[in-house]
Image (cartoon, grey):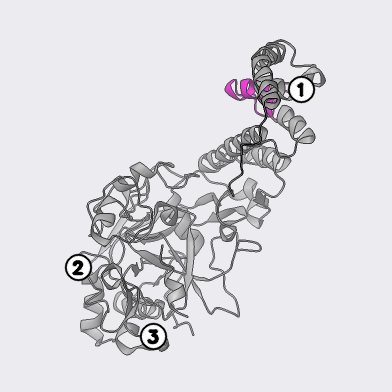
Amino acid sequence: MINQRAHLSSSHNMNNFNTLSVFILAAALVFIPAINAFAVNLTLDQHDDLDSLTIMGLLAAAQEDIEAGRYTEPVGKNAYEKVKKILAEDANHMGAARILSRILKINIEALQSSLNIGDSIGAKQYLKIIRKIHPDAIAISDAEKMLDDHLKAIPEAPGKTEKNDLTGEMIEIPGGSFLMGTLEGRKDEKPQHIVTVSTFEIGKYEVTVGQFKQFVEATAYLTDAETGAGQQKGCFGDGGGVDFGQKAGLNWREPGYTQSDNHPVVCVSMNDANAYIDWLNKETGHNYSLPTEAKWEYAARSGSITDYHFGNSKSDLCLYANVYDEAGKNVNSYGWRNAPCDDGEAKSAQVGQYKANPFGLYDMHGNVWEWVDDCWKSGYHDAPSNGAAYKSTDCTNRVTRGGSWYNIPLGVRSANRYWYEPTYRSFNLGFRLFRDTSLIVTQNTKPH
């Protein structure tokens, strides 16, 4: 896949087997089933005598434990102890590593479930187990220290919806705690850590062309794409799928493809988003802003720990998201791997066209990338644990979230993150409104 930011700046010979080698291999294959059968029988009947088991026997016993739900308990008769014994003898044993990974994932899912229902005792127990299996899997955060006092259940349904002619619908998201980041994703998505957020409001949809048009008509504002800010021409486009780069003449009115007033506004920089929000606050008397990265992910996950809020299935993505899919491949022919489904759109889609997440939010996966308020930081070491934006004296780059119609399934996961300079604009980049219900009106300032 074309890296938009980049536009800114043995086979082995197997013929040496002799007849004796083939004979030895064949003989071994004959005896292996008998050895394995003995190992499995021994496994099922003599769990207490782990030293008497072969590696194959331990592996079979561990798998049996997994199926029976004996992940880390009881002592001496659980899958964890068996795979640890295998890995002590063979640190690269893939079968044991896979089972260990499964045990870890099961306990991480259980931890998020405990956070969802406000079970602080369960959450701490699962944290203890997870750190026993993988000490660095979940980073220690301040939020973790407050589980007893502040852990609240995440309601299954979103809060009230507030509608304003200028802002569109805002949905109240109940506060709670969640696991931010991933265990197996990219380095900048790690480490996973517990974050606790207070109640807030976020846009039900991405800000639309029609909404942004009201601002421009009221203020005669010119976007960064129109003024050429940041030593860049216009807006990033695909040049018909063959000439990717910044294109003079592309802007929010003409992003290189047809949009209606109900499509998400694109080709807007972070500066443009904040200018719109400053105007909106003056008009409404409220305190809108861009969401923080943590609160954006909390809203996107809506209580899940999977790649997408509905699970991990790439073939189901098109029910919930506008991504690079069969429709995109047929029209755009970008050349990278597409989602194995058809969402019916080759470019951006009108907001609200696909299924909402459990919080009632649309297009949190795909459609267009969304600016958030944080300075870019590669990874979550020392990241805020209260849902606040990460700010730094070096805030050259700002975070974007959600992925877009241009991105493969990997790029629209809840945990996926990217960054651009605040003057950057693209034909697949927009924003969503946020309101902290605990704050009074404040004006945004343009990042430099």
Snapshot quadrant of residue 323: bottom left
The residue depicted at 41 percent of the width and 55 percent of the height is 412
Label 1 neighbour load within 10 Å: few <14, some 14-19, many 20+ = some
Q: Position of residue 351 (x, y in %)?
A: 25, 59
The numbered mark at residue 259 is 2
The numbered mark at residue 232 is 3
Real-space Cα separation, disc 1 to disc 3, in angstroms: 64 Å
Say if the magenta span includes residue 134. no
Q: Which residue is mark 1?
A: 76
Which circle's residue, 1 or 3, is located before the other in the chain? 1
Dot 1 falls on a residue whose secondary structure is loop
Instruction: Magenta stretch: give its range.
Output: 61-79
Query: Which mark's residue is nearer the viewer, 1 or 3?
Result: 3
Dot 3 falls on a residue whose secondary structure is loop
Say if 31 sits above or below 395 in the image.
Answer: above
Residue 401 located left or right of residue 215: right
